[in-house]
Image (cartoon, coloured by chain):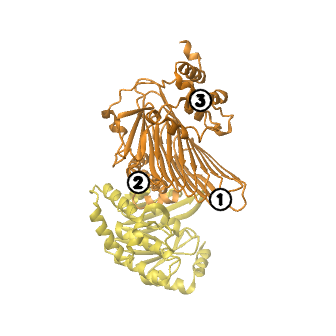
Amino acid sequence: MLSINELRASIEGKEILKGINLNIKPGEVHAIMGPNGSGKSTLASVLAGREEYEVTTGSVLFQGKNLLEMAAEERAAEGIFLAFQYPVEIPGVTTINFLKTAVNEIRKYRGESPLDAAQFLKMVREKAKLVSMNDSLLKRALNEGFSGGEKKRNEIFQMAVLEPKLAILDETDSGLDIDALRIVAEGVNSLRSPDRSAIVVTHYQRLLDYIVPDYVHVLYKGRIVKSGTKELAFELEEKGYDWIKAEVEAVS
Amino acid sequence: MSTETIDLKTKLVTDFYAKEAVMNGEASSAFHQKKRAALARFDQLGFPTPKNEEWKYSNVRDLISESYNFNAASSLEVADLEDLNIPEHVANILYFVNGHYSPELSNIVSSSDQITIDSLQNAYRNNPTLVNTYFDELVKDDTDAFTALNTAFAHDGLFIHIPDNQTVEHPVILRFVSDARTQNVGSQPRNIIAVGRNAHVKVAEAFRTLGPERSFTNVVTEIHMDKDSGVEYYKVQNESEKAYHVGTTQIRMLDNSQFYAGTVTLNGHFTRNNLNIIIDGEHCEAHMYGLYFPDGTQHVDNHTVADHRKPNSQSNELYKGILRDRAKGVFNGKIFVRPDAQKTNAFQSCKNIVLSTDATMYTKPQLEIFADDVKCSHGTTTGQIDEEALFYMRSRGISKPEAMSLLMFAFCADVVSQIKIDSIREYLEGVIAEKLTEK
């Protein structure tokens, strides 16, 4: 589904990603962990198409297509979804209106006819239930005045509505209490299927108690320095990142 | 032609005296004497130059470089109006074509035995004393040359007189059409709105142009508000790429009155709006909202004044603009709080999105406060589209142009939602959405 080869990316002349290699098959959930500043969010941003980052070398194929040539909106239409670490507040645009525009723009891209108001509302209500999202939030301006938990829940709700092939969760657990974390994780799990994949970017292991990954990768100084199964996450939780840092320094 | 060497000012002054010479006894009327005084004022002031602080960023050199026919006849028919119409529910609609009232096109639905809604010319013919009570009273000391010019040449426009305790149920919509299909046309409408004690009315002025030639509109509206009265006043400008518009709306408010103004400039080559509110009563509320969308080489200038003269009143102002291409915008908001006006609340905000490096926005808040127990605030911002919001929307599959339109429409929403005449708000929502769609 996703194949990243020797990906290097920089921002304002500073190289952040220094040769990433990663392969994700349909249905797999990969966790990307690592200390602060290792490049986790940069990887998520580059995959979603944030234009401030410059990809210097390497390739990214998504379902056989060259992802790096696509604009952010095309990537979304192809089936990539980024759940933001800091969801943006947009005064004056209601969540419902925003999502309706998004759904129908994506349908247009795929050559499908737009959903009418009734079809759309029915679908949205079902998805809102899935993430225990209060209907009243839908009519409010997008994320405006939402609590941290409401914002993250709104991200997962949007994901449920857009049904992506590849979901990238960027530190979705940050700022959530344990109840909110569980609701968000349940939303993510309910979307798991053999043809959907996910990249879960997180600093802590606790999210992975709820969203159990197939693989865990440790990102450090712009490279994946260690890969394993979910046991690696437990090891990191127990021992921290210092032993990995030491391993890397010893080799180089 | 030798006339080309005569400048616009000289021509206008000469015209005035030529017309006066053939007037009969009317020349000695109080009404005409006011016009005479105004002409003298205009003659003395002359058209403003950028040396005049009030006109620093708005140069009228181009406007006065050509001549205009101020008496142009028009063959405008109902069929020509289709594109110019704002779809209407029930309203009093008065058409003015090249400044002249057109009874054939107009439709007054409010009952005339209680409320006077008529053209200024008809109203003056029927009751010169009543009209003269209000005419020029609010602007006679104005030092603006265009206002003086309008008074000198005032011949038609709207006259509304609402007796105490009356509410005009249906809005009054004025449609000023400049028919510039065959020649440069000029018009100087003069509107008078006199609202009695505890009386209420909604008025909208809509300006349109027809045809490829130049139009010059110089409009003045005087609004007299008695105690406990309420006025909602809207100005919608959707004129041509060759339209020059200068307008002054002057309001005087007495105790407990409430005034709402919405000024929306959709199109026009050169637009200058003066909105001057004298708050001459206690417990008054004055609200001013504005929106402008200049593109190409359009120029939009909004000058506003909230002059607090009595205690315990409030004024509230929000202007927003989106500028593209090589457009220029000007906002100058004055707040005066006179020594007697203790406990005044005055708020002012002007926010702009500048979409091109060649577009310019000049903002100047000006607060002069002579009382010590007041709450005043002002703020202006000029920026670009929020890149983070744009990326957020694109990451959900919304194309860049669509995301830009949504964000800009959202930016305008808190001003548009203030327009309480449904038909006008709905019309504006449609026109603005279209205007904000990336070309």
Q: Quadrant of the N terminus of chain A?
A: bottom left
Q: Image quarter for residue B66? A: top right
Q: CA distance from mark 3 to mark 2?
A: 62 Å
| Residue under label 2 | B399
In terms of depth relative to the viewer, which is nearer, B397 or B172? B172
Distance (Cα) linking label 3 and label 1: 36 Å
The residues tagged by marks 1 and 2 sit, at their Cα atoms, a distance apart of 52 Å
What SS does tag 2 mark?
Answer: loop
For residue B27, which quarter of the picture?
A: top right
Q: Amino acid at mark 3?
A: Gln
Q: Earlier in the sequence, mark 3 or mark 1?
A: 3
Measuring from the top left, give residue B402's x and y in whole percent.
41, 52
Q: Which mark is residue B311?
A: 1
Residue A46 visible here: yes
Residue labelled with disc 3:
B33
Q: Residue B140 vs residue B243: left or right?
A: right
At which x and y percent is residue B20? 55, 22
Task: Work out whether residue B417 or residue B28 is closer to the camera in this orientation and state it.
Answer: B28
Kindly indicate whether the residues beneath marks 3 and 2 are on one polypeptide chain: yes
Amino acid type, mark 2 = Ser
Looking at the image, the residue that sits furthest to the bottom is A238
